[in-house]
Image (spheres, rainbow, N blue to C red):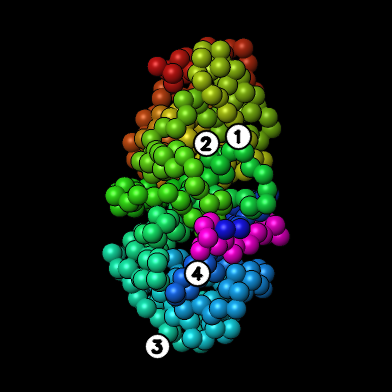
């Protein structure tokens, strides 16, 4: 696949990995993106995970057509992008690694005995690398999503090599009509904590005339760039993307689940917009995190457990706090057969998050939802939509 006449895609798909970063389900696989710039000087833009390094090296050599690379540009040292560096250095010992000073410091941590003396070039914000007709300008992007990250802008063809920014789950040989769905799940679970840092990067990019974005995961983006940039602006500012209510529930014997579904029906009848539910015991927690950030209102419904809250809800709250969840309205539904405690624990967790408005009243269900509970759910729904 070509991105242009002199810039080629040499990445690989991975359908064998079940969990990305050991925790995120990827039923449609993942792509490890890498690019090749053929000019007076030849630049390889990142490598791939060691799992697929042989296929990646074959793609590289096919693209080189007998030439030898001058530079390896390392935007990000995470193993899914830098895992083939040792293999590349063995094959082309004369290649020079171009990276941030932090990246060059970190790389030997991943490869025992790696010696970069005399074969590396540290670049910083604003530096350029001339390849001939093409020239790369570098921009620091710390904590998007590791501290050593940088992005580069190819000035002639106006291509942004964006590292993990604008990436998504899913291999490239899978048809995926909705870029935003898996890009959103990827963003909030990988970069969600670092909205301030993403905002800083977006401000730097605002001054560039970008025609194409080449991320390290997912498709090359060449059309409707304001759409992708606009979503990143919304996500990184923790603003609401979709008008609606997300209900996350953790139920032991089905009583809490019944209350959550009943509340969803009430909200829909009141015109709440999109209403989605997640069974935290069974559904993908990463998708639940995605929906929590996507919508402006959320309901947490959970059973009490061991004088606390049912563990799937505790885990979900942990993920929200870790990803810097903020600026949302949240309603509470608790269930308890003898000593309800879930509401207290959920409120304590939310109190540690920024700009969270607790919508009252808290609704308490005793074991099973009954007709007598309906007025309280009606009141809560009305308060949530007010």
Question: Are dots 1 and 4 in contact, CB under 8 Å?
Answer: no
Distance, label 3 to label 1, CA atoms, is: 53 Å
Q: Is residue 333 above or below residue 199?
A: above
Q: Is residue 12 magenta?
A: yes
Distance, label 3 to label 2, CA atoms, is: 48 Å
- Nearest to N terminus: mark 3 or mark 2: 3
Residue at image location 58% in from the left, 38% down from the top: 178
Task: For residue 309, say whether it is visible.
Answer: no
Identify the residue position indicated by label 2 in the image: 291
Q: Could you say where residue 255 lies in the image, as x and y percent from the top left?
A: 65, 27
Nearer-the-camera pick, 15 or 290: 15
Does residue 86 appear to the left or right of 144 in the view shown?
A: right
Does residue 173 appear to the left or right of 113 in the view shown?
A: right
Distance, label 4 to label 2, CA atoms, is: 42 Å
Identify the residue position indicated by label 4 in the image: 38
Instruction: Between label 3 and label 1, give the one nearer the viewer.
Output: 3
In which quadrant of the rendered image does the C terminus lie? top left
Mark number for residue 278?
A: 1
- Nearest to N terminus: mark 2 or mark 1: 1
Identify the residue position indicated by label 3 in the image: 118
Asked where in the image residue 254 lies, by quadrant, the reply is: top right
Task: For residue 59, say whether it is visible.
Answer: yes
Q: Could you say where residue 323 lies in the image, as x and y percent from the top left?
A: 44, 48
Question: Are dots 2 and 1 in contact, CB under 8 Å?
Answer: yes
Residue at image location 32% in from the left, 68% down from the top: 128
Circle 2 residues within 10 Å: few <14, some 14–19, many ≥20? many
Q: Could you say where residue 259 lies in the image, as x and y percent from the top left?
A: 60, 23
């Amino acid at each position: 696949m070509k991105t242009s006449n002199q810039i080629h895609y040499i990445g690989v798909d991975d359908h064998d990995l079940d969990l990305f970063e050991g925790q995120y389900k990827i039923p449609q696989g993942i792509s490890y993106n890498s690019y090749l710039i053929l000019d007076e000087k030849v630049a390889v833009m990142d490598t791939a995970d060691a799992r697929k390094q042989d296929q990646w090296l074959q793609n590289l050599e096919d693209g080189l057509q007998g030439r030898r690379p001058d530079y390896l540009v390392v935007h990000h040292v995470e193993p899914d992008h830098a895992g083939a560096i040792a293999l590349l250095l063995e094959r082309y010992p004369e290649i020079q690694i171009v990276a941030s000073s932090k990246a060059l410091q970190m790389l030997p941590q991943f490869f025992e005995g790696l010696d970069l003396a005399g074969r590396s070039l540290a670049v910083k914000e604003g530096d350029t690398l001339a390849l001939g007709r093409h020239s790369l300008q570098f921009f620091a992007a710390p904590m998007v999503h590791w501290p050593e990250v940088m992005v580069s802008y190819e000035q002639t063809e106006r291509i942004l090599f964006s590292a993990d920014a604008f990436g998504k789950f899913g291999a490239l040989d899978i048809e995926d009509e909705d870029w935003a769905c898996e890009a959103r799940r990827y963003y909030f679970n990988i970069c969600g904590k670092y909205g301030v840092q993403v905002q800083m990067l977006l401000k730097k990019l605002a001054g560039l005339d970008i025609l194409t974005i080449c991320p390290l995961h997912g498709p090359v983006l060449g059309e409707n760039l304001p759409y992708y940039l606009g979503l990143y602006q919304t996500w990184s500012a923790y603003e609401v993307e979709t008008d609606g209510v997300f209900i996350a529930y953790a139920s032991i014997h089905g009583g809490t689940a019944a209350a959550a579904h009943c509340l969803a029906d009430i909200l829909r009848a009141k015109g709440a917009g999109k209403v989605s539910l997640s069974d935290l015991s069974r559904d993908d927690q990463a998708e639940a995190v995605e929906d929590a950030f996507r919508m402006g209102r959320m309901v947490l419904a959970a059973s009490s457990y061991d004088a606390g809250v049912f563990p799937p809800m505790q885990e979900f709250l942990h993920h929200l706090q870790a990803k810097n969840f903020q600026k949302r309205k949240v309603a509470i539904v608790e269930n308890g057969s003898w000593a309800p405690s879930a509401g207290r624990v959920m409120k304590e967790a939310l109190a540690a998050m920024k700009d969270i408005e607790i919508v009252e009243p808290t609704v308490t269900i005793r074991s099973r939802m009954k007709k007598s509970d309906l007025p309280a759910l009606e009141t809560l729904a009305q308060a949530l939509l007010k």
